[in-house]
Amino acid sequence: MNSCAFCRIPANLSVPVDYRAFSLFNGSMDSMINAFTTIFLPIFLGIISRMGNFIPPKNRPVLQQFAVRITIPALIFSSLRTLDGNTAGQFLPMSLGLFLFMAITWLLLWGAISMLQKKFEWIGKYRSELLLISFTGNIGYICWKLHEIFAGTDGLQRGIFYTAFYWPFLLTFASLTVLVFGLNRTKELNKREFLYNLTPVLSGMFSGLAVGVLQINIPPWLIGLTDNFGTMAIPLILFCMGLSISFKKSIKTSGPLIPFLVLRLAVWIMATALMLRMPWFDDTSRRVLMINALAPLGVNPIVISDMFGLNTEFIANSTIISTVLFLLFIPGMFILWG
């Protein structure tokens, strides 16, 4: 008499339950929590250290220099010394791709800034700074961590390949930026600082490539030493990122900058879409490029702007705003690539 469908199921009937779905869900949640911890915890500790002045402002550049000049080259060496044939075959495409990407973004945003400066006075005032941040981004460091999370060790190696010639290309297009807008440098290029930033990275890259391609046996103590310093690299650079975030200074320029940063993001996504149509990238490289398309600004444009006498405070505020927006977007990346 009872018409309930559930009531017609015999009491002794056992309904099979596929627990694999629950295992996959729990595994995904564990991976996401682990990823969020490794990314956000060092940044949060850096913010706390800045707010509490645990590390005095005069010592912060020293910590960042240690990360860039010691631990990052060690990470590059440790990664490239174990590369395989497929990864080595992507070295030229990834390096060429970086140059083409910078050229595309530079040209598109140079045209946009040239038109917008006629309508907006502040764009005309900061046109060189805006063009500098248009083609630069944190495609290393924090993105390397995301490459490792979403594409494993191979993804980390491709990310390093992609940024192999980042500094020379950055300086080339920065010089072109100043030349096009006809601005004069207020001081000479600090060659020593530039070499200190560039030489360790290139040395780690080429020595790692030599060891990996030629299968050179190196002493175990050297492997352990570089691996230990390399392990420090990404947590330390994320900590330095948090150490540089100052919400009070950046909030004043957030109004006009956010629309421009959104425009920059749209151009980066469009340029990446064009890059993905090229046939020489494999699946791992394509995933790296898609992650890089969302990259925030890094410290590199600040260094370059100081070399050319541009407004470093404006670029620093832009970096902070871009970084905060990127951190808010990271959960969406896990949904896209989960």
Image: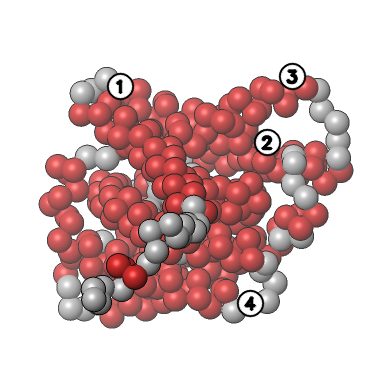
Residue displayed at 38% across by 59% down: 11
- Evaluate whether residue 199 shows in this view: no
Could you say whether the residue bearing mark 1 is in a helix, strand or loop? loop
Q: Earlier in the sequence, mark 2 or mark 4?
A: 2
Determine the CA span between mark 3 and mark 2.
13 Å
Q: Earlier in the sequence, mark 1 or mark 3?
A: 1
Determine the CA span between mark 1 and mark 2.
29 Å
Task: Locate the N terminus and report the quarter of the image it occupies.
Answer: bottom left
Q: Are marks 3 and 2 in contact (CB under 8 Å)?
A: no
Find residue 168 and report its horizontal and vertical position in percent. Answer: 57, 53
In-image side of 3 versus 337 (left or right): left
Tag 1: Cα neighbours inside 10 Å, few (<14), some, or many (≥20)? some
Q: Earlier in the sequence, mark 4 or mark 1?
A: 1
Residue displayed at 20% across by 29% down: 51
Q: Are marks 4 and 1 in contact (CB under 8 Å)?
A: no
Position above or below: 304 against 54: below
- Specify the amino acid type for callout 4: Met
In-image side of 202 versus 189 (left or right): right
- Specify the amino acid type for callout 3: Trp
User: Where does label 4 land, which residue?
Assistant: 278
Position above or below: 39 against 232: below
Tag 4: Cα neighbours inside 10 Å, few (<14), some, or many (≥20)? few
- Specify the amino acid type for callout 2: Ser
Determine the CA span between mark 2 and mark 4.
29 Å
Tag 2: Cα neighbours inside 10 Å, few (<14), some, or many (≥20)? many
Residue 295 falls in image quadrant? bottom left
User: Where does label 1 land, which residue?
Assistant: 55
Residue displayed at 21% across by 23% down: 52
Residue 78 shows which numbered tag?
2
Looking at this view, is 189 or 158 the one in front?
158
Q: Earlier in the sequence, mark 4 or mark 3?
A: 3
Residue 221 shows which numbered tag?
3
